[in-house]
Image (spheres, grey):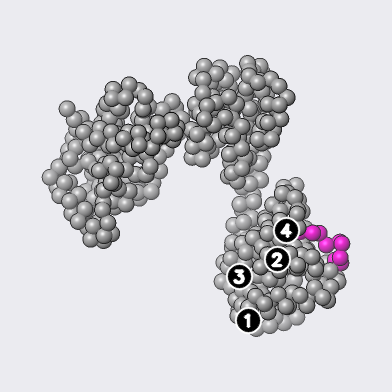
Amino acid sequence: MRITCAGQNELSEKNMTVNLETEYENEIHAPYTDSLTGLFNHGFFQLALERELKRSQRYETTFSLAFIDIDAFTSYNRHHGPIKGDLTLKEIATLVKKNIRDVDLAARYNGDVFAILLPECEPLQARDVMERIRQDLETLTGKNTTISIGIAGYSADSTNTSILINMAREALLHAKTRGKNRATIFREIKTPDLDHRPRILIVDDIPTNIKILESFLLPLKYEIMKAHNGEDALSIINRTDIDIVLLDVMMPVMDGFEVCRHIKSNERTRIIPVIMVTALDDSEAKIKAIESGADDFITKPPNRLELQARVKSLIQVKSLNSNLADLESVLFSLANTVEAKDEYTRGHTRRVSEIGVELAKKMGLSAKEIKEIKIGGIIHDIGKIGVPKAILSKPDKLTPEEFEIMKQHPYTGYTICLPLKQSLGTVLDIIYYHHEKLDGSGYPVGLKEENIPTGAKVMAVADIYDALTSDRPYRKAMPKEKALNIIRQDVEEGKLDRQIFEYLLELL
């Protein structure tokens, strides 16, 4: 027997879906169903959701959106093979169709995620429907396959489909990180305190080990999240903000070392501290943990006070690093603001940064120096925020007075970024000295030869090349060969570094 929702007009809703199918076929000229499951496809579902939202806004009705995600499906496919995985998707699709009304709409949203649209249905009623699907799957597979479900209901706050989708996804993530195999409604998720509670992810394939670590950390009032394998851990880290990871080493499929390498190789997650927790008490394991990028190493069973102290310390480090990353983002935004003042320089900083990085790699510079050149390339012209737009976009040659104003932009950029000296390091030199020349004819200081930092020499070549090969208000972009000849002349006159120019020729 189906669990139903009250207050619906089934006939009109069914007619609306039929009309939508016709419209989709006429517009897209492609099937509106998923070939494997027989459910609607992603594109059709988005169209239906948009239509349902407008209808609910017009008639002041409600509806619910649910996302169903198969737990640990990647591991399931690896162990059982893709054919078995596809059969499981079909089984779940059958259970979904069995338990929803004719007016409800089910789609294969992507991969192993299903989306259900339930018109004129409150979230609590929608959860009853979803629970029936979840329980039927448990019965069918003997709990070998489980699903997590996130539910969101339309409200006055849901002004567009993106907001509603994000609410349902947040509820799904909450269900996943609170133990899986459950259904969560978005409005039931506790609103976080105004003061952010640090969020700890404990990763271990043995539940007892997770409970021990959780009991040690609960007195600190942290928010605890859990994962039972490496793949789930990475999924959580990619979808939510984590302040620290306590990571078991010995796990099947993907061990802790590999998980740590994934975290530390990702630009977005690399600042998350990782503590490796393992029963291995030997120097080889510790060396491997360090090589994987781990920030600390604790053996089982951990000492409660020691664990608490290390976690507190690394969370403070994460907070400081996050603040610095936020400040970098502000600088990048300022750099974009500068480019927005002059349409001719749009994309200039990105291109200069990319050229600078490739030159630095050819020169064999360290990873730290390469990163500084990358950042320096993006913000090297940030001081132009103080140059009037009339000068930046002037179609004629600048007057001596105007050129003097333009020559101030390296110093202006330097002063803007100076408060971040501890974080930016030699990036400040790139900003300040990227217009200096080896013969002392550059600006704003007039440095010579070895007094000019390497990063600034690299940036000078990259900056001039991109400027010459890009459209400017006073001239069209030059052909590559002509630009290189001009730079070659500067090299011969002792203004630019010869070796860096040779690397540029190789690069091009």
Rounded to the nearest whole Å, what is the CA distance between mark 2 and mark 3?
Answer: 25 Å
The amino acid type found where label 3 is placed reads Thr
The amino acid type found where label 2 is placed reads Glu
Residue position marked by numbered label 4 in the rendering: 362
Rounded to the nearest whole Å, what is the CA distance between mark 4 and mark 1?
Answer: 33 Å
Q: Does residue 451 show up magenta in the picture?
A: yes
The amino acid type found where label 1 is placed reads Tyr
Q: Residue at x 68, y 83 (%)?
A: 397
Q: Does residue 239 show up magenta in the picture?
A: no
Residue 345 image label:
3
In the image: residue 439, left or right of residue 94: right
Residue position marked by numbered label 2 in the rendering: 506
Nearest to N terminus: mark 4 or mark 3: 3
Q: Pick the residue in front: 10 or 463.
A: 463
Of marks 4 and 3, the one in the foreground: 4
Nearest to N terminus: mark 3 or mark 1: 3
The amino acid type found where label 4 is placed reads Lys
Callout 3–callout 1 Cβ contact below 8 Å: no
In the image: residue 24, left or right of residue 162: left
Considering only vertical position in the picture, is 58 above or below 219? below
Q: Which residues are magenta?
A: 446-455
